[in-house]
Amino acid sequence: MADIESARATFGRFDADGDGFVTADEFRQAMAQMGDPFVTGPVADAVIAARDTDADGLMSFDEFWASLNK
């Protein structure tokens, strides 16, 4: 099981605008800033879609947390 405080900090790195949701573009940009230039738009779309349980096109913290605890 993941540590929720670490998870919140990590989620915050992805949530660039601080609205509580991570878009595919935010995910792609964060990964590039962390040194992974290979996360393209389609890859980011797939990662978000895999964690987006309510199908709104965004990853919430709850969805992120759930994905860490699978």
Image (cartoon, rainbow, N blue to C red):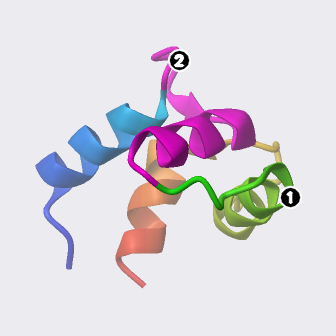
Compared with residue 51, is residue 20 higher up or lower down, i.e. above or below? above
| Nearer the observer, 21 or 37 | 37
Instruction: Check residue 32 for magenta coloring.
Output: yes
| Nearer the observer, 15 or 67 | 15
- Amino acid found under the numbered disc labelled 2: Asp
Q: In this view, does 23 lie to the left or right of 29?
A: right
| x, y percent for residue 40 | 76, 54
Q: In which quarter of the image is the C terminus?
A: bottom left
Residue 2 numbered tag: none
Compared with residue 52, is residue 66 higher up or lower down, i.e. above or below? below
Q: In this view, does 54 lie to the left or right of 67?
A: right
Q: In this view, does 50 lie to the left or right of 37?
A: right
Q: In which quarter of the image is the N terminus?
A: bottom left
Q: Which residue lies furthest to the bottom in this view?
A: 70
Q: In this view, does 39 lie to the left or right of 54?
A: left
Q: Residue at x 44, y 67 (%)?
A: 66
| Nearer the observer, 57 or 26 | 26
Q: How far apart are marks 2 and 1 (CA)?
A: 22 Å
* Callout 1 secondary element: helix
- Amino acid found under the numbered disc labelled 1: Pro
Identify the residue under disc 1.
42
Residue 19 numbered tag: 2
| x, y percent for residue 18 | 45, 17
